[in-house]
Image: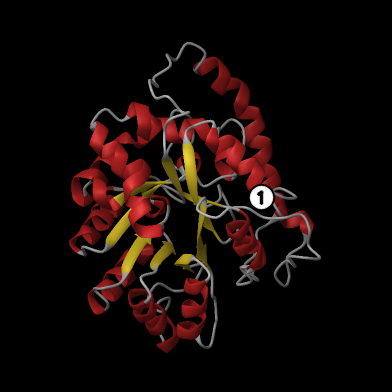
Amino acid sequence: MKPQVKRQGNGTRSATTRREFLQAAAAAAGAWTMATANLPAQSTVDSSRADWVDAHAHVWSGDTARYPLRTGLTRQQMILPSFMPEELLDKSGRCGVRRIVLIQISYYGSDNACMLDAMRANPGVFSGVARIDGDPRPRETMLRLARQGIRGIRIVSEKQPADRWLQGPEMAAIWRSAAENRLTLCALCGPDYFRALDAMCRKFPETTLALDHLGRVGFERSIREDDVRNLCALAVHKKVCVKVSGFYAMGRRQPPYLDLAPLIRRLFEAFGPQRLLWGSDSPFQMMPPHRYRDSIELVRDRLDFLSADDRQWLLRKTAERLFF
């Protein structure tokens, strides 16, 4: 999920919107520094001994000859020229994160080569969630990707009508094959699509589904009670999970993100800790005034309704069960 993103007709991101985001983030950095100058350190965790799992992050290369960009996308439209695995591992490792679920970045469309190469170069460190948009033979492709270590498939609503997004034989094959191959479907969508997800979960109850970024409640509009209630209602499906991620783009969009605590608590009460999993959404979480550390500290140190065992589920065990 990207902050304040507008999409062009071809599905790519507007470069102007990205510049506006970066300019606004830089302007806010000074205010954030002053506001948190006296914030006490919360963490008592020895990061050198921690074993957390980041359930949502992206990497991409600046080598567009080796990894061509999707049709219609230019270098100027990328939020950063590159974000390499080494950069991600440096930031995450300082916070005790030892394993990471890589999510296929939209810059490459359904060409998952860059992500697969990062996984092969770092065995046991990275898991992966691929994209297979528009694949005419999704079952065969998903089986092949599963053999290469992929543990999830991302489905994205984009601007599709809610009543048509998940329709058609190809999408049915994806949901069925996900269950057959023990792959988790990761849905990037907002509250307007919860009803469509509910219908598919009823049709394919054996398919595991994880909603990205708190279901994007509070992303394009304020946090509404109806949206929260409808998201929590999906907990009736025992294979539905929610990623507790994307804090930089929701609510007040200011560290330490405590304004999101009531929403997370509602989800905790509905889904329980074993169906919630934390993710950073790096590198977007690293854009000033945000830091990688800000994201993990909200769950690890600041949500006082979580027990030590709850935190183990949100920060490791749930992601471990689904993706490793």
25 to 314, vertically: above or below? above
263 to 308, vertically: above or below? below
Q: Is residue 274 visible?
A: yes
Element type at marker 1?
A: helix
The residue pinned by badge 1 equals 17
Give the percent coordinates (x, y) of residue 239: 26, 64
Q: Nearer the viewer, residue 216 or 185?
A: 185
Give the percent coordinates (x, y) of residue 177: 38, 80
Give the percent coordinates (x, y) of residue 129: 49, 63
Q: Nearer the viewer, residue 239 or 263?
A: 239
The single residue placed furthest to the top in the displayed view is 38
Q: How many numbered discs, if any?
A: 1
Please rate how many residues cluster around mark 1, counting C-alpha atoms within 10 Å: few if below 14, some from 14 to 19, many from 20.
some
Which residue is found at the position 41% from the left and 88% from the top?
169
Quadrant in which the C terminus is drawn: bottom left
304 to 248, vertically: above or below? above
Give the percent coordinates (x, y) of residue 71: 72, 73
Q: Amino acid at mark 1?
A: Thr
